[in-house]
Image (cartoon, rainbow, N blue to C red):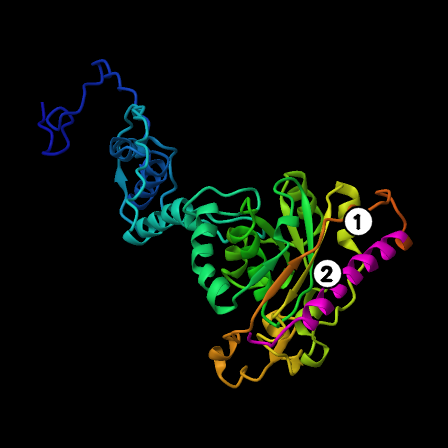
Amino acid sequence: MARSKLGNDPFRRGAASPDSPRPVEAPKEAPAAKVTRKQRRAAARELAMHETAPEAAEAAEAVAPALEPAVESPGEPVIEVAPEPVVEPVIEPAVEAVEPAPSPRSVAHEVSDVITSETLPLPPRPGEVSPAITPGETDAFGRDPAFAERALRLLEPVYRHYFRVEARGVENVPADGPVILVANHSGAVPWDVAMLAASTALDHPSRRVLRPLVEDFVFHFPFVGTAFNRLGAVRACQENAEALLAAGEAVAVFPEGAKGLGKSYRKRYQLQRFGRGGFVKLALRTGAPVVPVAIVGAEETHPVLARLVRPAAPLGLPFLPVTPTFPWLGALGLLPLPTKWTIEFGSPVRLDARPDADELVIGRLTEEIRAAIQGQLDRLLRGRRGIFT
């Protein structure tokens, strides 16, 4: 038997015999999904964005190969990754965010707000008094009895020794109950209001407290309106006056208003028009008696030579007076001259009319009270020895 050449013998090369059974081929496995590094990182980042715990981010990177098969991009090396079971990441409860500590600036602002709200209240409205500057109790209109008493002690030397006020007929003012005092107004600076209030508080047998009704412009100045409220003055209006009379107070009104303060020296002690009779309507509605009051001596404290209206408008004043001392001496020119004063209180008058009387009746009663005060002034001037004596 001839020998086969080297390399041609199928048995020597390991080939199977034709008679031997063929081996069963094992089933081929499905090709593994192929993803690039770039796609794996992108998938891991997308999953990590929806998780807050660090473990979830690591789990997202671990399960990135199990995502949908990606298309092989040319030019990048391909890494075969065997499929692995998807692991569900354990999501821990999110940690509550901690607010940052307040800065020193914000803390200072909070402390400032607390101080302002508790000890420094906003400026008061008319008729109200700030508790931060009120040492004692006040009434509904802001009068502070302790403050008013201290002010009266300071005003008494001016009343007794500087102006040497003589109060005549002060006992005509009722000891209690509602009453309206109607007085003339003059002198550029309202010293007559202060002296009238001092006369009832110092010389009246019952030391009657007087509540003057003052003009609106007084309350336009910082601290001035509040000081007047604490002394007992009240903004002039019908509602305030009725409330005071209903409480049994003594109310002082000055029907001439700013016209009386600003009348020139040559028109001294000549009463101006008494408005529209507001005090008469008030007396008819409340039934309070009216006491006419004549004040002599106030006209010469600041003799008005002229009035400056335009320069006073930005200041909220009806006018700026020109006197022998003001504005030439500056603030010193506001010091009043030491004239001799006389205050005469007339007999109480009960107005005989219905509360709903017409304007003609109101005008007639107003003129009667005005004539009574003018008669008192004329009589006092005739008996006067001099301006300073």
In the image, taking residue 359 as reference, residue 27 lies left or right, namely: left
Placement of the N terminus among the 4 image quadrants: top left
In the image, taking residue 112 as reference, residue 182 lies left or right, namely: right
Q: In the rendering, at what x and y percent does residue 218 appear?
A: 59, 62
Q: What secondary structure is found at the residue carrying circle 1?
A: helix
Question: Mark 1–mark 2 contact, CB under 8 Å?
Answer: no
Q: Which of 67 and 289 is in front in this view?
A: 289
Magenta residues? 361-389
In the image, taking residue 220 as reference, residue 282 lies left or right, namely: right
Instruction: Classify mark 1: residues with Cα within 10 Å, few (<14), some (14-19) or many (20+).
Output: many
Which label number is shown at residue 92?
A: none
Q: In this view, does 277 lie above or below 324?
A: above
Determine the image quadrant of residue 59: top left
Determine the image quadrant of residue 326: bottom right
Residue 124 in sight from this viewpoint: no
Placement of the C terminus among the 4 image quadrants: bottom right
In the rendered structure, which disc, 1 or 2, sits on the residue that comes first in sequence?
Answer: 2
Distance from the alpha carbon under mark 1 to that under mark 2: 13 Å
Residue, disc 1: 281
Q: In the rendering, at what x and y percent does residue 8 appear?
A: 15, 32
Residue, disc 2: 255
- At label 1, the amino acid type is Lys
Residue 146 in sight from this viewpoint: yes
Q: Is residue 101 above or below residue 262?
A: above
Q: Nearer the viewer, residue 41 or 237?
A: 237
- At label 2, the amino acid type is Pro
Residue drawn where x is 33% and y is 51% of the image: 106
Residue drawn where x is 55% and y is 60% of the image: 194
Verify whether residue 378 appears in magenta: yes
Q: Which of 216 and 285 is in front in this view?
A: 285
Predominant SS of the magenta segment = helix
